[in-house]
Image (tube, rainbow, N blue to C red):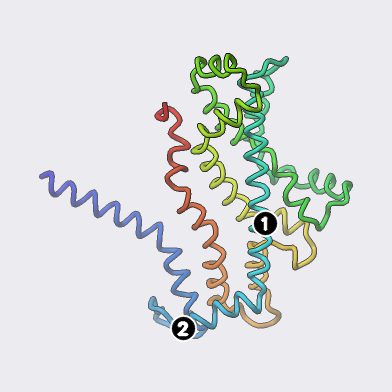
Amino acid sequence: MSKRTANLLVHLALSLSVAVVAAPLILAFIFSTQTPAQIFSYPPKFTLGTALLENYRTAWYEFNLGRYMLNSFYIAIAVTVGKTVLSFMAALALVYFRFPLKNWVFTFILLTLMMPTEIMIIALFDLVSDLGWSNTYAALIVPFLASATGTFLFRQQFLQIPLSLVDAAKIDGAGPIRFAWSILLPMSMNVIAALAVIEFVYMWNQYLWPLIVIREGDRQVVQVGLRLMMNVGQDATNWGIVMAGAILALLPALVVFLLLQEQFSRGFALSQEK
């Protein structure tokens, strides 16, 4: 097999893989432009329909999608900022401070990575109810402020900073706060960006916990709002409107990723930064 043929096969395989991965999103956009009759027509039509503006307008105004997206945006930003700050401070303590059982504490933090939120739902709901936080934004934000992933990423980043730089800061009279603000923070921007992408998308896609703990519709998040679009009384679900809502709900997370994709990639290339 010649080199040209091999390259052609590789490109065909990659193009096919991209098409398979992108197919659900492309179909969702096509269906978001079609009326129910066009969606359920036979043979299926994979061309743009005639209800693009109507479906997106209905999803935004009649199903209150804008309010749901605003709630998700507030919660995702609050959790992302809180997790970044707490993870940064936790890693700072683990790397540069001496205290008993430090390695055991880090091991315990890593073990929490293996505990999905779903197994703590009942205990978490009891705790939130006892605190009087049911049906509040605090119930959606506070339980998610700690991050083992963020602590691990910052710890690995700090361990790669030369000790000579730490000694130079001490000689210069820099205290822990100044050292963290003036040296560690500027050198950790890629890790911060990577963590921001992960946590923003994670919180934006929250569904189960908001569904359990929030009762008022005006305080719900966008993923629950999409589910409510399917419950429109006795009428059949208008999948064109649901797909339009799904496309709109995808945009904020996509924008965040596109803005931070370069820093996101560098944030995980820890061994190549120095």
Give the residue type at disc 1: Tyr
Looking at the rendered structure, the secondary structure element under dot 2 is helix
At which x and y percent is residue 53?
51, 81
Picture quadrant of residue 74:
bottom right
Q: Residue at x 50, y 75 (%)?
A: 32
Q: Does residue 61 lie above or below 259 as drawn?
A: below
Give SS at disc 1.
Answer: helix
Tell me, for residue 235, which label it has, or none: none
Q: Residue at x 53, y 73 (%)?
A: 244
Measured as percent of width and height from the top left, residue 247 is found at 52, 67
How far, Cα to Cα, is label 1 from label 2?
A: 37 Å
Q: Where residue 49 sits in the image (x, y, percent)? A: 43, 82
For this rendering, which residue is in front, 140 or 83? 83
From the image, tell me which residue sits under label 2. 38
| Quadrant including the C terminus | top left
| Front residue of 9 and 253 | 253
Residue reaching furthest to the left? 2
Q: Earlier in the sequence, mark 1 or mark 2?
A: 2
**Is 258 left or right of 90, judged from the image as shown?**
left
Identify the residue position indicated by label 1 in the image. Answer: 74
The amino acid type, in three-letter code, at marker 2 is: Gln
37 to the left or right of 91: left
Vertical relation: 169 (above or below) 56: above
